[in-house]
Image (tube, helix red, strand yellow):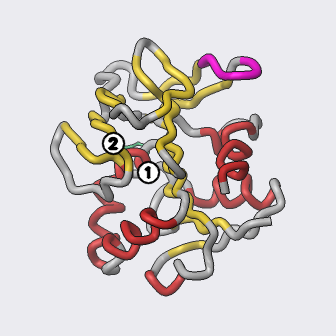
Amino acid sequence: MPTIGVLALQGDFEAHQRVLQELGCSAPQVRAAKDLPQLDALVIPGGESTTMLKLLRLEDLLEPLRQFGLAKPIFGTCAGTILLASEVTRPEQESLALMDLTVERNAYGRQVHSQVTRIPYEGGELEAVFIRAPVIRRAGPGVQVLSEFQGTPVLVSEGRHLAATFHPELTADRRVHRLFLDRI
Ligand code: GLN
């Protein structure tokens, strides 16, 4: 089974580690550039993308992660999706720009910061937990939309990368993590 690192600077990285270990992977925490060469793939968890960005700069990890993503698969959830996108709005912020996406942060408005709902997915609906989620406002021509909710993409892939605006690591359904494993 592959070794899939989980970026562990901030956010719900432990939940991803548990899922990956349950699926038989080795899932070491990644905190520095020296942790990257041993990995087959990487997960960037949910959390606060601005905080992660700050810590990535502090650790000089932004460019190494970008280089990693040019060669190997990355799966981003929520804040991880914001970091993978080529364009981030509300407000604009730097990102890894590894997927051709425009992502608007905290886009579900004030009343509905968070919700648990069901979204369409191949092989039957998925339970999806949205927590102060971003909305994917634009997906480039190379992006495959795997699921939509309220008319916008919530699960997308492009080349080797996968991104969800919800949190598959917080529900019992393992299909999204399995999908990522299948691509490695
Ligand atoms: N609102 C967060 C951000 O803008 C993302 C929330 C999450 O990862 N659950 O980074």
Characterize the magenta stretch by its predominant secondary structure. loop
Circle 2 packing at 10 Å, graded few (<14), some (14-19), many (20+), is: some
- Amino acid bearing label 1: Gly
The residue carrying mark 2 is 100
Q: Quadrant of ligand 1?
A: top left
19 falls in the magenta region: no
Q: Is mark 1 within 8 Å of ligand 1?
A: yes
Left or right: 159, with 94 as reference point: right
Q: Would you say 46 lies left or right of 87 here?
A: right
- Numbered label tally: 2
Q: Which quadrant is the C terminus positioned in?
A: bottom right
**Amino acid at circle 2:** Asp
Question: Considering the image in quadrants, where does the N terminus appear?
Answer: bottom right
Please give the range of residues in magenta: 118-124
Which residue is located at x 51 percent, y 40 percent?
Answer: 157
Front tag of 1 and 2: 2
Please tell me the numbered disc located at residue 80: 1
Mark 1 and mark 2 lie on one chain; the one further toward the N terminus is 1
